Structure formats: C-alpha cells, structure tokens
Amino acid sequence: MQMRAGMEKDSLRVSIIQTAIVWENRAANLVHYGTLLRQLDGRTDLAVLPELFTTGSIRDPELADLMEGETASTLKQWAQAYRIALAGSFMAEENGKYYNRAFFVTPEGRLFHADKRHLFRAGGEDRYLEAGTKRLTVSFRGWNICLLVCYDLRFPVWSRNVANAYDLLLYCANWPAVRSDAWRILLPARAVENQACVCGVNRTGIDGAGHAFHGGSALYSPRGEKLADAGDAGEILLTCTLEKSMLESLRTRFPVWKDADAFEMLPCVPRCPAH
C-alpha cells in the first residue's frame, strides 16, 4: 500500500526521538512525548518515535486504543501544531482484535497505518496480537518512506526494496540490550542491500518486565555509512538532513536494484531417496 502526503522536496530532515517509555501508562507517555516534540517545532520534517511509544507493552487489552481514540487524535494534533510528520507504533484495537500498529501522520493531520508483520514469538506477541498483511509506504516531500516495526528488521524478504519502491526505510523498535549487536549489524545491512537510507529508533530504560534497552538509534546511508548515532547514553533528540540527490546518484552509477531477485516461487528440487 502506498500513500501520497505533502510537497516534493530534495532534502529531508529526520529526527530520532530516543527515550524511555513509562510502563503501561498512556497518559504519562503522551505528556512526555508531547514535551519532547515541542522542542522540534518547525525544526524538522519527520520525527520518529519508538515502538509502542504510549505503553511499552502489549500484554493487557485495556492498553489498546481505537483509531478514533486518544492516541491517534493526539498524534494528529502534534503533527499540525509542530508542523512535522510523525512515525512510530502503538497498540491498537480493531473489531475486537489487537495489533502493533505502525503509523505515519502528516503535518496536515492525515494518518496512514499498517500493522507489524512479524510477531515476536519468544516474547509472546503471537499470543496477544494479529500479524499485519501489508507494508506501508508513504510519499512525503519527494521521498518514498517505508515504515516497519522492530522484529521485522530480521526478515530481509519483507524489508526488500523492489524496484526502488522506497527511499527511506524506518524501523521503530523496543529492541532489548541483550540483542543490541544484532541491531547494529542488521540496520546497515538493510541499507546496503536495499540501496536506501535506513533509520532505526529504539527506546531506552528498563521496562516493567525487567528488560533493559540501550537505545542505539541510528541513521545509515545506502552505503551503510552511519550518518547519525544516538548512542546508548539515554534520552536524546537527534536530527539529520538527508539529500535525495545523493541517493539517486548512487542508484544511477551503481544500479544493483536492476539485478535483484523477483522472489517468485521456484519449483522444489525432488528429495533424493534415502539409501
């Protein structure tokens, strides 16, 4: 699914919001993130929030919000008031089912969404949530932006950039410190293999289940070069300007995307009989 939003523009200012999440407390998180976003008023084009930014948890159905609820309405108010686009995810309820819902809100207050595809089985997500079936790509200020969620990072086929469908790939995450090495490896890998800029935004702090998060939010060029690094020191707002001309020049001079696999289903090789 691809949506169009905003005016065309060559450069794009992307802001990482790396901070802790108050465990299962929507009201407190909305106050905190509203305060942080106020500092970006007119100073960025797109602010990326961590996964499940209002709750940090998906265990309690009472934590879920409707698309007409407080979370969505507050996101639209922030985007319009501070003249920025917003991306991240929250726990949503729809028709009695629950989703880890990725969102993209434009400065005009239009909200687009899709749901996390790969549910983290080791953490029990598959017991609480429904898996998404579509990928969200939004056209915003001349950039095609794809938004995926946390565990989706581990699955290159789902992240695959077919025929340069996107220019910027976002991952909002609650990625635990114990697996931070994988986070640091996979983000630049997704950038290089897809010839796109990649931004990963992770939370910090310790959640209500005792899991530690060390941030490590970063933005990478399509060559895998680190353009911005929030580190693991804790709360930080970090802004980096991306240039579309740099991306297009690389794709023209080194058109790897033209030789990419189509991921069509291939016939299975017959299994040899055992001897």
Image: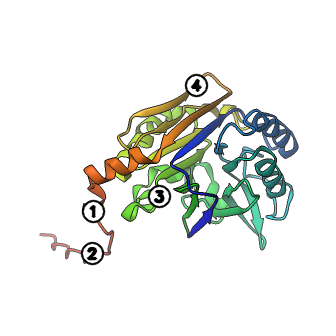
Mark 1 vs mark 4, CA separation in Å: 37 Å
Location of mark 3 (residue): 166
Earlier sequence position, callout 3 versus callout 2 = 3
Earlier sequence position, callout 3 versus callout 4 = 3
Left or right: 26 in relation to 168? right
Between disc 1 and disc 4, the foreground one is: 1
Between disc 3 and disc 2, the foreground one is: 3
* Amino acid, disc 3: Tyr
Position of 171 relative to 130 (above/below):
above
- The numbered dot on residue 232 is 4
Residue 5 locus on image (x, y percent): 63, 61
Local crowd size for mark 4, using a 10 Å CA cut-off: few (<14), some (14–19), many (≥20)? some
Local crowd size for mark 3, using a 10 Å CA cut-off: few (<14), some (14–19), many (≥20)? many
Q: Quarter of the image holding residue 27?
A: top right
Location of mark 1 (residue): 258
Position of 203 relative to 98 (above/below):
above
* Amino acid, disc 4: Asp
Mark 4 vs mark 2, CA separation in Å: 43 Å
* Amino acid, disc 2: Leu
Earlier sequence position, callout 2 versus callout 1 = 1
Quick check: marks 2 and 1 in contact, CB under 8 Å?
Answer: no
Q: Is residue 179 visible?
A: yes
Residue 117 locus on image (x, y percent): 56, 61
Residue 227 locus on image (x, y percent): 47, 33
Between disc 3 and disc 4, the foreground one is: 3
Along the line of sight, which residue is nearer the eye, 175 or 113?
113
Left or right: 162 in relation to 18? left
Local crowd size for mark 1, using a 10 Å CA cut-off: few (<14), some (14–19), many (≥20)? few
Along the line of sight, which residue is nearer the eye, 119 or 50?
50
